[in-house]
Amino acid sequence: MPTPASQITSSYTSGLRYEDFDCSRLSVELDSLARRENQLVIAQEQRYKTSQTQAFWWGFGQGDGVEASELANVRGEKEAVRKAMEIKGCK
């Protein structure tokens, strides 16, 4: 069975990518990552629901797909951006 989106934790992402970003650019990046995270949560939850239905009818469901690993990566990127914003004193 696929992992529920709420149980997918962030993967480690280095903050070096964001060192040269100013506060405005970090804010835009964070917004973009948040939108992508929402899309991936919806996709993962749909995969979970579909898999539950399959398990009911056929006795087995799907596992995690690319959505789960990408969601973990996006969550890691969001953490890196937040840390960069904290370091730079962004509001």
Image (cartoon, helix red, strand yellow):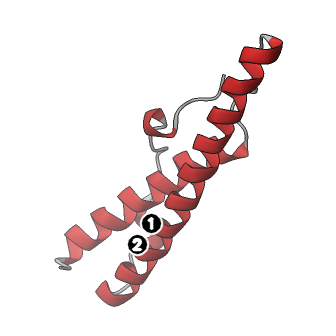
Residue drawn 58% across and 42% down?
A: 45
Residue 57's x, y, as percent?
79, 16
Q: Nearer the viewer, residue 5 or 75?
A: 5
Relative to 76, is 59 above or below? above
Residue drawn 33% across and 89% down?
A: 24
Dot 1 amino acid type: Ala
Dot 2 amino acid type: Leu
Q: Secondary structure at mark 2?
A: helix
Residue drawn 51% across and 59% down?
A: 37
Relative to 8, is 78 above or below? below
Residue drawn 21% across and 70% down?
A: 87
Q: Are marks 2 and 1 in contact (CB under 8 Å)?
A: yes
Residue 69's x, y, as percent?
63, 43
Tell which residue pokes out farthest to the top in this image.
59
Numbered mark located on residue 34 in the image = 1
Relative to 8, is 31 above or below? below
Numbered mark located on residue 30 in the image = 2
Q: Secondary structure at mark 1?
A: helix
